[in-house]
Image (spheres, rainbow, N blue to C red):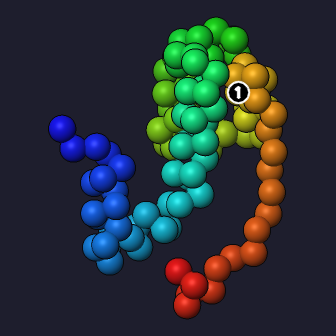
Amino acid sequence: MTKLDDLHKKWMKEPAYKQAYDTLEEEFGLASALHKARDAAHMTQEDVAKAMGTTQTVIARLESGRIMPSTRTLQRFARATGMRLRISFEPEQSASER
């Protein structure tokens, strides 16, 4: 079975895929961070949903990157998974650094 990470590495060598991914990098990064926080807490989407007072469908949407959550929602997710929310700003990379 091919792992998603292996496919992603392979596809990142294709210019069109890389450009599309880079355009959505922040959204993918946030979705990945949410999933990692839940995984580190050894919780299911249903567990997090119950702790947040919402539904599993909402958690699935958050983790898919299809919606951009508010900081309040991120804070609730962090508390539900026993994490602390940290938001930072970083300088943008120049085109030559990408």
Q: How many marks?
A: 1
Relative image position of residue 7 (x, y in whole percent): 28, 54
Q: Name which residue lies at 80% across and 57% down.
A: 88
Position of residue 17 relative to residue 94, above or below, is above
Q: Where is residue 56 in the image (x, y as percent from the top left)?
A: 52, 17
The spot of residue 91 in percent (x, y) is 75, 75
The relative height of residue 69 versus residue 27 in the rendered view (above or below) is: above
Is the residue marked by circle 1 packed among few (<14), some (14-19), or many (20+) residues within 10 Å? Answer: many
In front here: 10 or 90? 10
Task: Tell me the residue at 55%/27% (across/down).
Answer: 39
Q: Which residue is drawn at 76% across and 29% down?
A: 83
Task: Identify the residue position indicated by label 1 in the image.
Answer: 77
Percent position (x, y) of residue 37? 63, 32
Pick the residue in front: 97 or 26.
97
Q: Is residue 66 visible?
A: yes
Query: Quadrant location of the N terminus?
Result: top left
Image side of residue 2 versus residue 13, left or right: left
* Three-letter amino acid code of the residue under disc 1: Phe
In the figure, residue 31 lies in which quadrant? Answer: top right
Is residue 2 rendered to the left or right of residue 91?
A: left
Give the residue drawn at x 53%, y 19%.
Answer: 45
Residue at the outermost left position = 1
Q: In which quarter of the image is residue 9?
A: bottom left
Q: Can residue 58 be seen in this view?
A: no
* Above or below: residue 20 compared with residue 38: below
**Element assignment for label 1:** helix
